[in-house]
Image: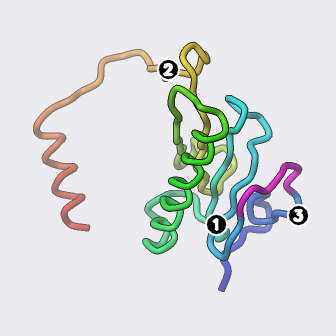
Amino acid sequence: MKKIRENCIFCHKELLKTDIVYEDDLVMVFMDMDPINEGHVLLIPKDHYLDMDEIPDEVLSHLSMVAKKLVAALKDIYCPDGYSIMQNGGRFNDIGHFHLHIFPRYDGDGFGWVYGKGSKTVSADLAGRIQELVQKG
């Protein structure tokens, strides 16, 4: 059974006001309406998920395979200096539906990371805790 959410624009492609560039049974790709650079696309699972850890492995694997094809297409069309693939989870997902941003990058394009203030902790203890949880599955 298809997982959709009534108030989610990505669950209702008829509400999208942009061009769809790829679609199959599991995923859909469309042009970002507020692109960072020309060629910026969004890759989404058709079923509604908020976060990566909710997505079945089969769908997540398929998302990666489609992302690979998108990167190749963007490289062929735009000849960029590189590309970025980004995903914001939890409350930082402004749509509330898992989506990958994939876009060509250029030297001097102005896009970059912004770091918050304050010190960050990096330690072997933290690495060990993460490692333990990842190995549990």
Pinpoint residue 47: horizontal percent, then vertical percent.
64, 71
Span of residues in magenta: 16-22
Is tag 3's residue or tag 2's residue first in the polypeptide sequence? 3
Disc 2 marks a residue whose amino acid type is Val
Query: Would residue 88 be found to the left or right of residue 38 on screen?
Result: left
Disc 3 marks a residue whose amino acid type is Glu
The residue at which mark 3 appears reads as 14
Residue 119: image quadrant is: top left
Residue 40: image quadrant is: top right
Which residue appears at 65% of the width and 57% of the height? 97
Disc 1 marks a residue whose amino acid type is Val
The residue at which mark 1 appears reads as 27
Residue 17 shown in magenta: yes
Calculate the distance from the C-alpha at mark 2 to the C-alpha at mark 1.
30 Å
Which residue appears at 59% of the width and 64% of the height? 49
The residue at which mark 2 appears reads as 114
